[in-house]
Image (cartoon, rainbow, N blue to C red):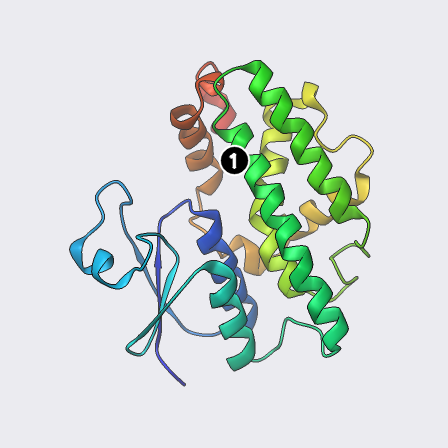
Amino acid sequence: MAALHLISFDICPFVQRSTIALEEKGVEYELTFIDLADKPDWFLAISPRGKVPLLKVDDAVLFESTAILEYLDETVEPRLHDADPIVRARDRAWFSIADELFGAVWGMMSAPDRDALAGKAEAVRGAMTRLSGDLEGPLWHGERFSALDAVAAPGLLRALWLDALYPELKLFDGLEGVRAWAETLAARPAVKRSAVPDLHARFVAGIRRYGAVHRDLPETAAAR
């Protein structure tokens, strides 16, 4: 099997999609963290967009999280995608809604004030409501972990954390199935192994930097 080397940033949700897939498949890989504020020259030389994740497959370099996920699923068992081509195509279409969800979550993470935070919370609820339409539960396809679970997990985890920080926004109000999905993913061993152990604390520290509205969060907010 080819040597796999993943280039990452410690709190990047898009890299987490790749590491979730790698952990679910139980494949060996090397992991290197870089500082996105001070990108090394060797990284810039091989990254077409100057972004993570990058996956080196021997000497070849892949970029973009969903492209990396698709490569891993085509080359490493067990397959995360369904055997039925219609189901695979529909799941790939749902990837765009998972991306929409994370875009709204990022809007909450980087919100400058309470009005912006509340507006993005509505966008998060909208994306999760759309996802709930095809959700079987407890995972996307019932008991079977799928590619869409890997794609959606980072956004759903961060939505859970934001809901705990701002319960008055009721992110999951009327979306009990989506909350159960998010909590099932959060408890899954491969998802737990997919990021640094103190990811939640780093998340809280990060949103304090990204969004002015979060700067008044108490120090205890980072505790789990």
Q: Residue at x 63, y 71 (%)?
A: 80
Q: Residue 200: horizontal and vertical position, in percent?
A: 49, 38
Residue 86 at x, y = what percent? 76, 72
Horizontally, residue 185 falls left or right of residue 39, namely right
Name the residue located 41 percent from the left edge and 36 percent from the top edge.
202
Would you name the residue on which mark 1 appears? 106
Please tell me which residue lies in front, 124 or 163.
124
Residue 215 horizontal/vertical position (percent): 44, 17
Q: Quadrant of residue 31?
A: bottom left
Can I make out residue 80 in this image? yes
| Residue at 44 percent of width and 60 percent of height | 64
Instruction: Give me the residue at 51% from left, 24% from top.
Output: 221
Q: Name the element at disc 1.
A: helix
Q: Is residue 160 above or below residue 219?
A: below
Question: Which quadrant holds the C terminus?
Answer: top right
170 horizontally vs 14: left or right? right
Q: Determine whether 142 is above or below 111 in the image.
A: below
Quadrant of image for the N terminus: bottom left
Q: Is residue 101 above or below residue 224?
A: below
Is 93 on the left or on the right of 113, as rendered?
A: right
Which quadrant of the structure image shows residue 78? bottom right
Mark 1 burial class by Cα count in 10 Å: few <14, some 14-19, many 20+: some
